[in-house]
Image (spheres, rainbow, N blue to C red):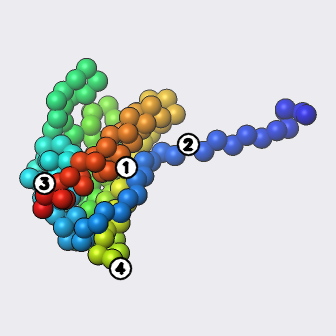
Amino acid sequence: MNLRSTRVTIKLMKKIQLDLTVPYPIETVWQAIVKPELMSQWLMETDISPEVGHEFKFKGKPNKGWRGWVDCKVTKVDAPNMIQFTWQNSEKHTPTTITYTLSKNGDNSTHINAVNDGFDSTYGAFDGLLFRSMIKFGMKVEFKKKLPTVLAKM
């Protein structure tokens, strides 16, 4: 085998995507995503509002690698189907774009597509491969465990 003529293509995804279906109507899920008092229960403390141009923060406990807040700005809203906002967790990182898209299913359940897109070299090697892995783990916990708990109480 001639290794010089062998081509290897590696595609690194520069986004994080999570899909899940929850057994709640789209209107209920929408409220859990855009009402600050509800979103603060499953993600982080926030003052989000589903208004294009609204600037808001997510706040958490600071640690050695994180300042303790994320600066955000709502860029698109199509209630109750989609909200999009920028996400900048550090001055040194390029903002990424978060998009939550909701789809109503025939059985009155809701499909959620959550995407965090736009990672680049400001996030470290391989456009933040390690950073994206940590964020993806957190998203799974938030969307698959914490959000359903909040929805069940609504």
Q: Residue furthest top?
A: 64
The disc, 4 or 3, on the residue closer to the chain's N-terminal end is: 3
Q: Distance from label 2 to label 4 (Cα)?
A: 35 Å
Q: Nearer the viewer, mark 4 or mark 3?
A: 4
| Mark 2 Cα shell of 10 Å, populated few (<14), some (14-19), many (≥20) | few
* Residue corresponding to mark 2: 12
The image shows residue 61 at horizontal and vertical percentages of 16, 30
Foreground label between 4 and 1: 4
Q: CB of mark 1 within 8 Å of CB of mark 3?
A: no
* Residue appearing at x 18%, y 43% in the figure: 44
* Mark earlier in primary sequence (2, 4): 2
Q: Disc 4 or 1, which lies upstream in sequence?
A: 4
Q: Which mark is residue 116?
A: 1
Tag 2 and tag 1, C-beta contact below 8 Å: no
In depth, the one of 45 and 70 nearer the eye is 45
Does residue 33 sit above or below 92 in this rendering? below
- The structure residue drawn at horizontal position 24% and vertical position 55%, both measured from the top left corner, is 148
Quadrant of the rendering where the C terminus is positioned: bottom left
CA gap, disc 1 and disc 3 = 20 Å
Residue 55 screen position, x and y as percent? 15, 51
**Inter-mark Cα distance, 4 to 1:** 27 Å
Question: What is the quadrant of residue 93 in the picture?
Answer: top left
Q: CA distance from mark 4 to mark 3?
A: 25 Å
Relative to 2, residue 79 above or below: below
Callout 1 secondary element: strand
Q: Which residue is denoted by mark 3 in the rendering? A: 38
Mark 1 or 3, nearer chain start: 3
